[in-house]
């Protein structure tokens, strides 16, 4: 594909404006200055003002992560990974992580800017967990979960907690520390037996079975961007 077409596909500029950027020496291909007649092939690295741009469409998938699958792109131990459960192209990465034995809502995307913000503690994205626990938490235990629990990395922020049934608790957090739910419930005397995330940033699994995924709808992507104040990327295409 011609360099100006590539830049247009990447949402950088119209082809005509892309030609201007190229002539101004602001575009490099594999480290060399781009020219009007430069062709871009698969695997080439294109940079505008030193920032890599990509003509891949943006993709956003909501996966119902099953148990036994690790939230990583590549696992040195060879265990199945979440990226193997979604389409291989365009390449996406998980936003945040769930433990291998945790099931539930996991977002995967190649929209790096949005992923970065969603995972950043500053934005306090809401996560809804359903836990099966040892014993049956009473109101005192629930109140401790709501008020904040002292963990070895500090006190947890106020959370919502309610009993769903015998030995079943729903926790709504705006933090995302490692093993946080398991550590919080253990700290109030109710170690987790099973953990499921039913909601992430307002996205819900609905009837999606374990191991299945769906693309986000355009309005869901727009809502996520609004949630974290991330502007839409001009004319970049989306598969959502
Ligand atoms: N908290 C946990 O303990 N585990 C998870 O997978 C997610 C949140």
Image (tube, rainbow, N blue to C red):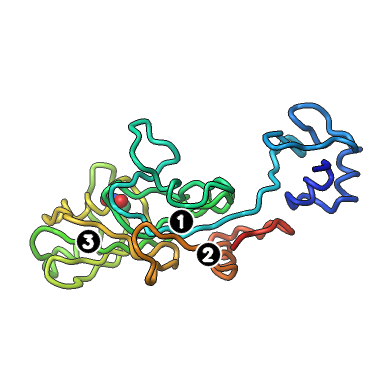
Q: Position of residue 25 (x, y in %)?
A: 87, 34
Label 1 sits on residue: 107
Image quarter hosting the N terminus: top right
Q: Is residue 38 left or right of residue 156?
A: right
The answer to whether residue 21 is visible is: yes
Residue occupying image coordinates x 22% and y 70% = 162
* Residue at 59 percent of width and 63 percent of height: 240
> For this view, does 111 lie left or right of residue 189?
right
* Left or right of residue 23, residue 166 in this image: left
Q: In this view, does 117 lie to the left or right of 128?
A: right
Residue at disc 2, secondary structure = loop
Q: Mark 3 = which residue?
A: 131
Count of numbered tags? 3
Which residue corresponds to mark 2? 216
- Residue placed farthest to the top in the image? 32
Label 1 lies in ligand 1 vicinity (Cβ under 8 Å): no
Q: Which of marks 3 and 1 is nearer the N terminus?
A: 1
């Amino acid at each position: 594909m011609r360099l100006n077409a590539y830049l247009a596909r990447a949402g950088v500029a119209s082809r005509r404006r892309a030609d201007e950027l190229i002539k101004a020496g602001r575009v490099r291909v594999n480290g060399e200055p781009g020219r009007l007649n430069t062709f871009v092939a698969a695997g080439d690295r294109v940079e505008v003002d030193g920032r890599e741009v990509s003509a891949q469409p943006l993709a956003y998938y909501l996966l119902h992560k099953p148990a036994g699958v690790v939230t990583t792109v590549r696992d040195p131990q060879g265990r199945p990974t979440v990226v193997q459960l979604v389409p291989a192209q365009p390449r996406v990465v998980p936003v945040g992580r769930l433990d291998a034995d945790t099931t539930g809502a996991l977002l995967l995307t190649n929209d790096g800017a949005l992923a970065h913000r969603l995972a950043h503690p500053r934005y306090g994205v809401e996560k809804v967990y359903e836990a099966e626990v040892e014993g049956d938490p009473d109101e005192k235990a629930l109140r401790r979960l709501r008020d904040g629990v002292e963990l070895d990395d500090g006190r947890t922020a106020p959370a919502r907690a309610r009993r769903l049934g015998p030995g079943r608790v729903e926790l709504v957090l705006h933090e995302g520390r490692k093993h946080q739910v398991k550590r919080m419930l253990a700290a109030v005397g109710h170690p987790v037996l099973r953990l499921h995330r039913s909601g992430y940033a307002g996205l819900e699994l609905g009837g999606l079975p374990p191991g299945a995924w769906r693309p986000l709808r355009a309005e869901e992507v727009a809502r996520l961007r609004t949630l974290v104040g991330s502007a839409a990327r001009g004319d970049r295409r989306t598969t959502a």
